[in-house]
Image: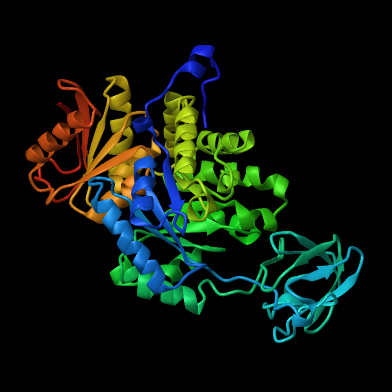
Amino acid sequence: MATKYDITLEHIRNEFPTASRRTKIVCTLGPACWSVEGLTNLIDAGMNVARFNFSHGDHISHFSTLERLREAVAARPGSNVAVMLDTKGPEIRTGKVDPSLGDKVKFTKGDIIEVGTDYTQFVTSTYLACSYPSLPTSVKVGSKILVADGALMLQVTEIKAASVMARVLNNAAFGSTKNMNLPGAVVDLPTLTEKDISDLKNFGVAYQVDFIAASFVRKGSDIDFIRSVLGEKGANIKIIAKIENQEGMENFDEILTKTDGIMVARGDLGMEIPIEKVFLAQKMMIRKCNLAGKPVVTATQMLESMITNPRPTRAECADVANAVLDGSDVVMLSGETANGEFPVEAVTMMGNTAIEAESLVDYDTQFDFIRQKSLARGVPLSPTESLASSAVKTARELACPLIVVLTENGLSARLVAKYRTPVPVLVVTAEAAVARQTQGYVRNVVAVVEESLTDYDALVQRALAVAVQRGLARSGDAVVVVNGSQDSDAAAANTLRLHYA
């Protein structure tokens, strides 16, 4: 992302208003924040999306949290907090530790152990049970196996019919059912487990969540399958593909074409590719998402130390800032808000850091770059995208403080955001879900809900009144209005106009 390099001492001294933040924040819910008071505090601190992690808990506990979230949102009208269901996804795990060994099993560097697919066996210092039946055909001699988030590293030395032999590369000790990664391997796992399908149908669709964060997406057909599971009743739920392994990266372009958004899930990705290359993968994926006009979330360990400390490390703040400068539309907190001691402080810190980073973005250069790349594809822009691009250009040339977008499904707003306007985008929609989705993961958007979009003139007048009330524009300011709604007056549909607040 293009940035301004003439940073001065005055710039460092400046304080930017928190209301000016363009980047959105996802907060993972958990015991540290899931009371009504805790959730209200997160909303006040800047939470845009509430993430429900379905790797933990059951439908009853998640529904209770959802009810409390709705109560908190009702106490903050206009907050438009969206709900994200993050699937557990297919995974490979170790078996249970032999009870005679206590809570943990120890492995010694240099030992040769058997990693087997008989999941009924206990884990010992010589046998590591694995839940993945296709292990022997997925790895080869020399392949690495990482266990318990990389606490144990193994190297395959021999392939057998139902197991592999492997050398222990470091001393380690861990308990039962730990995660296992096979860097570089193409794994034979389902797109969705039975649990995932139940979660999508019986929770996601039943309670009309706004986003599905789909774990371990590896190819474009995974997105097709997830849409088929959501069905007609879940057709409006947006899918965010989590890229967590080598196969997902290799098929990234195909996935990006079919998904609604991307999550750069750096935790498992750092197990699947060399960790020193994760930042390269992050930049590549963010850039491609920016050019496609699809929202991108950067996640994992962004302010990890704030789980136990009231202040982050300098490196963590730099990580958040660099994610914003790379072009992230959304940044995410996990354990920091779910079970940390300082959830509100973590959201506040993330928001403040994002604002500081945004002050360095060269929006004019960004607009020119994205427009040039979009036109260079050799395919004409759609009418909707052409209007969106022109709206940003007009607002820039006339120094308009605001762009208003009338939209039924959020597409016009997303395409305006693609062209990286520095001014806020006020979305007007008749769908509460569209308001939550656009304000939740589309950069620089705030949204209001109207009963209908049929009366164009009345809608614009109300939108401008809201803009003045919220300080988005002043009376007399010129404001660009994009009407992407087909429900409006026929003469006003698919138009770009200039109005005065």
Give the residue drawn at x 89%, y 63%: 109
Q: Nearer the viewer, residue 436 or 305?
A: 305
Give the residue drawn at x 85%, y 77%: 126
Give the residue drawn at x 62%, y 33%: 314
Residue 228 seen in the figure: no
Residue 342 seen in the figure: yes
Q: Quadrant of the C terminus?
A: top left
Q: How is the image coloured?
A: rainbow
Count up the numbered dots.
Answer: 0
Q: Is residue 400 above or below residue 227?
A: above
x, y percent for residue 162:
77, 84
x, y percent for residue 260:
41, 55
x, y percent for residue 370:
45, 34
x, y percent for residue 375:
42, 37
Q: Is residue 140 above or below residue 286?
A: below
